[in-house]
Image (tube, coloured by chain):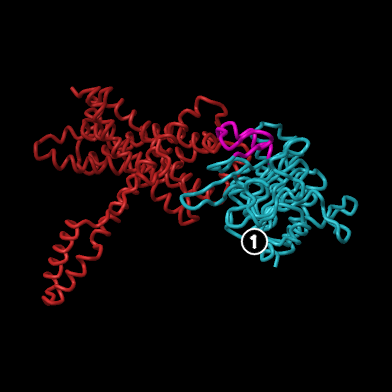
Amino acid sequence: MPASAQPGQEDPASNGSDPTLPAEAGPVLAFRNVSIAFEGPPVLEDISFSVAPGETRVLLGPAGVGKSVLLKMANGLLRPDEGSILLFGEEIATMPEEQLFPLRTRAGMVFQEGALFDSLTVRDNVAYQLIQERIPDEEIDRRVRDALRFVELEDTFGLYPASLSGGMRRRVAIARALIRQPELLLYDSPTGGLDPVTSTTIIELIVKERDVYRTPSLLVTHRLQDAFTLCTHRFDSGQGHMVPLPKGETDPGTTFLMLEEGRLIFDGSLHDLVTSQNAFVREFLQ
Amino acid sequence: MLTRFPSQFTLRAPAISQPAAHRSMKVTAVRCAILSLQPSLLARFVLRRAVQPSSFEAENTMAFDTIDKTAKKLVLTVQDYSLFALRAFTNLYRPPIYWPEFLVQSDIIGFGSLSIVVLSGISTGGVLALQSAATLSAFGATAVTGQFVSLTMIRELGPVLTGVMVSGRNASSMASELGSMVVTEQIDAMRALGVDPSRKLVTPRIFASVAMLFFLTIVADACGIAGGGLVTVFMNHQNGTQYFSMAWEHLRYPDIVQGLVKPLFFGYILGSIGCFYGLRTTGGTQGVGRSTIQAVVTASVLIIFVDFLITQLLLTLLPPL
């Protein structure tokens, strides 16, 4: 049992994904006994888990439990007080900021509100990394159009973020995260504050990304419905949209983590989640 | 390096001792006398205060705690600012250097501030001419008005006034712009995309401030002398040729050096303070407003204080004849 699991809680190893034992190619991301505090009690305490290649991990928990903090530690935007974080096999908990920049370009991140640069057009936002790398304009335009086509927002090429709706901004943020074909995707509450229809559109994009590119990802959400949709649907390339999996089937690469008061209390599959006897998990599911 | 507030450094509330209780009784008695309480009430009150911890002591302890925390916060802020300003400077020696950003910021700071610098320069020069002529006429020395205005503008008022005016316009703009980027997670997004905000946002703004303040100060000096000339000729009805010849002839290289060294420091101060407070913004839109105020106040006060230090240093290095 990993250090984060407490007596009476779920055993994260029960689904066969022991964070201390890397998968065949090694985990893309691994947290080992990570803790962090901000002038007060710990926000996260003794967190251990990993994201294997091709795996989608959904981090659940109520608001204010430290989900976004955990996500920001995953690419070194925040430093843990204790423990180690391995990103693409490299220890980033103590890595100097200068060395972190090239590593971060290999991971795409979608922020809670999109975090688009409001002084730049959609084209320049999506192409931000490519512009820094001084790639020729023709190639940038082509790749930006491809990325925007993926999120079905080709028409917004020359617009500014201020003229986009909340859902469109999230989709542009997803296009920005995808443009360099990252090796890991981090989603910070991508459907937070959106209406159910727009939320489903965003989740469909995430399912599409998962099933088309198989990019490993860590997704933070407090919406159970989104998490279940991710696990019970697949993207049908022929039909061009998301379809439900046959009854009783779930996506084997999509698993769940749950936080309660800064501690990881659950790590397992959808089946493990719905059959969990943990009081907090049961309360959360209801 | 101080990075935390270790608990052992925090002043603790001292346990109330016998002399302290005695002193507290005295204070309470004085307070009661002032309030003209009845003797029996006074006795009961004093007795109760003698056996209970005094609120006066608690207030003192809280005051010490507050001073303690404020002092540590101040030291940490100075430390953070020093490291921040140093990093912004050393960024110049390591690629990538964002020249397009530097040009954009130079346009915003330099050309954008030109009108306020011209207007304030002309007005200040004019006021100097008016005031000095009134005083100098008492000694029959109105002829030296030009010398007085040019030396005051070039050595002191040109750099300081331009620094304060430009910091009011641009330090506030930098703090609010970067602060808004912080609260909307755009700075985090930039870092997540592999771009260093210190190189991309801070260094170009600081060096654009330094370069533009240098030229704006020259403009302010010229406008100030011209404004003084206009007032001398059209309001004081004195000879314009005499004004400008006195302004020119008594000008020495040390005066010009003093006037042109200062804006280099002031530009660095206003740029770095604006960016520093902008990037430290917390607390949403209210925090952006707070950062903006802090940036303008700190930059203005620092410019005036550093002006004193530089003047003292330059007067030592380049003594007046």
In depth, the one of A164 and B144 nearer the eye is A164
Q: What's under tag 1, amino acid-wise?
A: Gly
**Res. A164 in view:** no
**Res. A185 in view:** yes
Q: Which chain is cyan?
A: A
In depth, the one of B72 and B276 nearer the eye is B72
Look at mark 1 in the image and give the residue it sits on. A193
B86 inside magenta stretch: no
Q: Is residue A172 above or below residue B2?
A: below
Q: Is residue B267 above or below residue B174?
A: above
A85 inside magenta stretch: yes
Q: Which residues are magenta?
A: A84-107
Tell me if B93 is positioned left or right of A236 in this view: left
Residue B312 sits in quarter: top left
Of helix, strand and loop, which one carries label 1? loop
- Residue B123: % across, % down: 30, 44
Residue A135 sits in quarter: top right
- Residue B208: % across, % down: 46, 34
Image point (18%, 61%), residue name: B24
Q: Is residue A115 above or below residue B161?
A: below
Which image quadrant: the C terminus of chain B?
Answer: top left
- Residue A283: % across, % down: 67, 66
Image point (66%, 57%), residue name: A8
